[in-house]
Image (cartoon, rainbow, N blue to C red):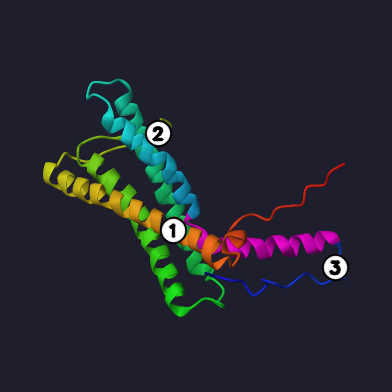
Amino acid sequence: MWIPETEGRSAPQDLNPQSRSCIGAVARLSTLQPHGVGAASATSVLVLPLAWVATSLARDAAAKPVLFQFHKSVGLTILALVVARILWRTFNPPPPEVGEPAGLALIARVSHWLLYAVFLLMPVSGFLLSAFNGSSTQFFYLFPIPGFEKNEAIRNLFQSVHLAGQWAVYALVLLHIAGTAWHVAIRRDGVLDRMLPEQKPLIRG
């Protein structure tokens, strides 16, 4: 896990409260950056149930195509988030890792980049299987994204990729949940605290 150089340091006491607050916010933000796929992970909470419900409906159900359009729209949103995140990370490399065993750091990096790969693969394969079915995508019913000429062989290929990718999503999300539980319940190293926004103490009147 990334631990910024500011971790464990307090702001200089000669700064005014506004400056100390600003420094604290920047330090907290730096701890959040390695977990940028969290936005895509959170959005996947929406995209998966949409697919589950849509596929369970009868073929002639009026809600079925609507749910699939929202499923594809959320998927393309995830794609945009992940691409933006990768571009941001390219120009803003993380601080050096400290205080983490080399093996655990490697596992964290690999699982992190696997999540990037899956969150790129799933929306791309999902869009292409729909596009090569000759279907357009109504992006949240704001504007259409046209499909391609229908090609059953290519469509089936991307459908297989998309269906296989969902199991990778389940596995990687469970791995991250298990890793978080391990840090919280076993190591108790404060990793989760560094991932969460800073909480201001409640002042009772």
Amino acid type, residue under disc 3 in the picture? Leu
Residue 178, label in figure: 1
Q: Nearer the viewer, residue 193 or 33?
A: 193
Residue shown at 39% from the left, 54% from the top: 174
In this rendering, the answer to whether 132 lies above or below 24 is: above
Amino acid type, residue under disc 1 in the picture? Ala
Q: Which residue is mark 3?
A: 15
Q: Position of residue 124 (x, y in %)?
A: 31, 50
Left or right: where 189 falls relative to 121: right
Q: On the image, which quarter does residue 50 sit in?
A: top left
Q: Position of residue 144 (x, y in %)?
A: 36, 34
Which stretch appears magenta? 17-37
Q: Position of residue 18 (x, y in %)?
A: 82, 59
Which element is circle 1 on? Answer: helix
User: Which secondary structure class fits the magenta region best?
Assistant: helix
First in sequence, mark 3 or 2: give its number. 3
**Callout 2: few (<14), some (14-19), or many (20+) C-alpha neighbours within 10 Å?**
few
Q: Which is more foreground, mark 1 or mark 2?
A: 1
